[in-house]
Amino acid sequence: MLLETKKLNKIYESGKVKFQALYNVDLAFNEGEFSALVGPSGSGKTTLLNCMGCIDKPESGEIFLEGENLTQKNSAQQARVRKEKYGFIFQTYNLMPVLNVYENVELPMKLLKKHSDKEIKDMVYKILDEVGLKGLEKRMPLELSGGQQQRVSVARALIKKPKVIFADEPTANLDSKTGEAIIDLMHELNEVEKVTFIFSTHDKMVMKHARRIIELKDGRIA
């Protein structure tokens, strides 16, 4: 088992109002999955994704990655997991606007501090070629189309060869043709690199490509 949640609960508070976003969620993912969390807005998809990704902290329950209990780790240890073992793709791309394509993709490897500059350069050029961005290394994010920006975010997530990539509505800001090309790219990289992809999505096209669909309703597995 690669990733597992046990009795996961998440509550948000706004003033005196409490809202429970997740109720006792039990889920397990094997290595190499290409799975989608689906459901209406407010069903808990993004909350579940963020809890598994150590972005949000659950009120109770446990999250295990390769047998390690992530909920018992402190914030610094969880940040290390995000840095070394997780990749993230967001619907708003979340690129650094002051960095060019090459620098955005290079950044995670610089933060890891495990490779020489020569090794990083080779890795960046290889992944940019794989995602169809060869020749655009010096472009700034605002000089790219939405589809190209999302390809940069895919490259940035993949370059460190993470155990899991969490993709939150990755096609939401793309037209249908570009969105399908992005999902085809991720599907191919999933098969070749064996990276586990977990999506949250409303997009039927993403659901069509997923090998497993997990439906949420009112914070519960439906």
Image (cartoon, rainbow, N blue to C red):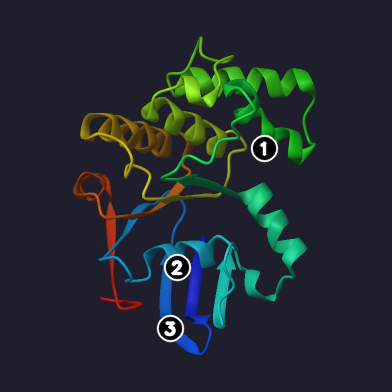
Q: Badge 1 is on which residue?
A: 108
Kindly report the distance in space between the C-alpha atoms of the residues bearing marks 2 and 1: 24 Å
Q: Are marks 3 and 2 in contact (CB under 8 Å)?
A: no
Mark 1 / mark 3, whichever is N-terminal = 3
- Asked if residue 208 is positioned above or below residue 38 in the image, the reply reads above
In the picture, the disc for residue 19 is: 3
- Neighbor class of circle 2 (other Cα within 10 Å; few <14, some 14-19, many 20+) is many
Kindly report the distance in space between the C-alpha atoms of the residues bearing marks 1 and 3: 35 Å
Residue 91 percent across, percent down from the top left:
41, 45
Residue 24 percent across, percent down from the top left:
43, 84
Q: Badge 2 is on which residue?
A: 48
In front: label 3 or label 2:
3
Which amino acid lies under the numbered mark 3 shown in the image of this protein? Phe
Which amino acid lies under the numbered mark 2 shown in the image of this protein? Leu
- Neighbor class of circle 1 (other Cα within 10 Å; few <14, some 14-19, many 20+) is some
Q: Which residue is at 60% across, 29% downward?
A: 105
Give whichever of 53, 67 is nearer the camera.
53
- Extreme residue in the bottom direction: 16
Which amino acid lies under the numbered mark 1 shown in the image of this protein? Pro
Q: Which residue is at 72% across, 22% downward?
A: 119
Mark 2 / mark 1, whichever is N-terminal = 2
